[in-house]
Amino acid sequence: MKGNSALAIAVCIACFLIGYLAYLSAAFFVDLFIERAVPCQNTAEVCAQQERSQKDR
């Protein structure tokens, strides 16, 4: 029984790590797409520089 219990715990930990990594990668990609959709929402300095460069043209 000890071998089965250790195997079950190892499988549970492996599944948790796979799920956690999948969650992190999904959150990363969603954040990346949101940042590309609205690039000036969080970084005011970059937007201010972009506005100045567009006015200079």
Image (cartoon, rainbow, N blue to C red):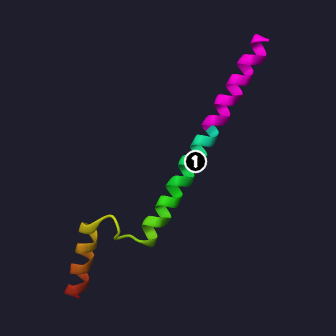
In the image, 37 versus 53, the foreground residue is: 37
In this rendering, the answer to whether 35 lies above or below 50 is: above
Q: Is residue 33 left or right of residue 56?
A: right
Residue 10 in the image: x percent, y percent? 68, 24
In this rendering, the answer to whether 6 lies above or below 49 is: above
Residue 5 in the image: x percent, y percent? 74, 17
Q: Is residue 19 magenta?
A: no
Residue at the image position 52 percent from the left and 58 percent from the top: 29
Q: Is residue 25 left or right of residue 46?
A: right
In this rendering, the answer to whether 49 lies above or below 55 is: above
Circle 1: residue type: Tyr
Residue 45 in the image: x percent, y percent? 24, 67
Residue at the image position 26 percent from the left and 84 percent from the top: 54
Residue 42 position by quadrant: bottom left
Q: Is residue 23 left or right of residue 6?
A: left
Q: Quadrant of the N terminus?
A: top right
Residue 30 in the image: x percent, y percent? 52, 60
The overriding secondary structure of the stretch rendered in magenta is helix
Residue position marked by numbered label 1 in the rendering: 23
Q: Is residue 11 magenta?
A: yes
Residue at the image position 64 percent from the left and 29 percent from the top: 13
In this rendering, the answer to whether 37 lies above or below 29 is: below
Residue at the image position 71 percent from the left and 17 percent from the top: 6
Residue 11 position by quadrant: top right
Query: SS class of the residue under badge 1?
Result: helix
Residue 49 position by quadrant: bottom left
Q: Quadrant of the C terminus?
A: bottom left
Q: Is residue 19 left or right of residue 31?
A: right
The residue segment tinted magenta is 1-17
In the image, 57 versus 19, the foreground residue is: 19
Extreme top residue here? 2
In the image, 9 versus 46, the foreground residue is: 9
